[in-house]
Image (cartoon, grey):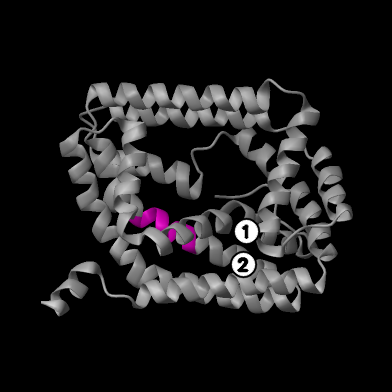
Amino acid sequence: MTRTWRPNPRRRTAIVLAALLAGIALLTAGCSLVRLFWGHLPDAMVARADDWLDLDSNGEQALRARLVPWLERARREAFPRYADFLRELANRTAAGFNAQDASWVEQRLDLLYAEAAETALDAWLVPTLRGLSPSQRRHLAKRLRARNAHYRDTYLRVSRHERARIIAGRIVREVERWTGKLDVHQVALVEHGTARLPDTAAAWYRDRLRMQATLLADLDATDAPSAALRRGLEAWLIDRRARDPESGAYREVFRARLSALLVRLARSLSARQRLDAARRFRELAGQLDQLAAAQPPAAADNETD
């Protein structure tokens, strides 16, 4: 997709932190869960899907049967790539970011995300959604409306100042997961910068509603092939070509200004904060390596027979 804005070399440095906030934080939260409860992860994912889709016992079994091989493939094939990425990121973090590092992180994260999303669509997401009954589709629509109400209460029915405060808090919390505690000057830098971000909440909400309406219409078109549903999901989740142009323009402006803010924050990090972040990246890489090298439960059980 052609973008109306491209970050210049100085601003691209901030993509490192922006991507970490939006992507790697989610990845690591998931991987920590996998490390502790890997054997229970399919059940946890089925329970989460049931909350949204109101699955019956047959639907739960079918989803679990799709998830287990997908997760096993991710463990064997994707986790080593994640670990390599994190180790290289740790090296670059410890040395301090530059424009080349930022470009590398942005491109690598885009690739890893696209790979994961593509395999999920084919392995379990599209088959599960295509198999929903009318009552399950109504349940999904109800859950989406509830989430939309939460979004309105959190972001639209508050002042612009409060929205900026919420964003600042999220940025500080996610950065501190890697760097440790930010000092008062760094927190103030984030708060001042988020107050100057464009107010995009309403535009994002309209885009959110369009995406949901398209998904529900695709699901209601029972005669449509799965390939059509997949194309629609791919457009929304991966290449974003179905997004509203106005919303896309807002996002680009928001991203540009957020990038400028995160550049300033990255430059404010102390040597200790950079080393702490690098250490955490390496620790997570080691956890992923251990999981990738471990035998699946069935193989381990066979060896003890």
Magenta span: chief secondary structure: helix
* Residue at (39% x, 42% y) in the render: 233
Outermost residue toward the right?
A: 185
* Residue 106: % across, % down: 61, 63
Q: Quadrant of residue 213?
A: top left
Check contact, mark 2 vs mark 1: CB within 8 A.
Answer: yes
Question: To which residue does mark 1 refer?
Answer: 20
The span shown in magenta is 112-119
Earlier sequence position, callout 2 versus callout 1: 1
In the rendered structure, the answer to whether residue 124 lies left or right of residue 163 reads left
Against 162, residue 185 (above or below) is below
Against 74, residue 92 (above or below) is below
| Mark 2 crowd level (few <14, some 14–19, many ≥20, 10 Å Cα) | many
Tell which tag, 2 or 1, sits nearer the viewer: 1
Identify the element where label 1 is drawn.
helix
* Residue at (24% x, 43% y) in the render: 127
* Residue 105: % across, % down: 61, 67
Q: Nearer the viewer, residue 164 or 197?
A: 164
In the rendered structure, the answer to whether residue 192 lies left or right of residue 159 reads right
Instruction: Answer yes or no: is residue 100 visible.
Output: no
| Marks 2 and 1, how far apart at CA | 9 Å
Outermost residue toward the front?
A: 304
Question: To which residue does mark 2 refer?
Answer: 105
In the rendered structure, the answer to whether residue 57 lies left or right of residue 108 reads left
Q: Amino acid at mark 2?
A: Val
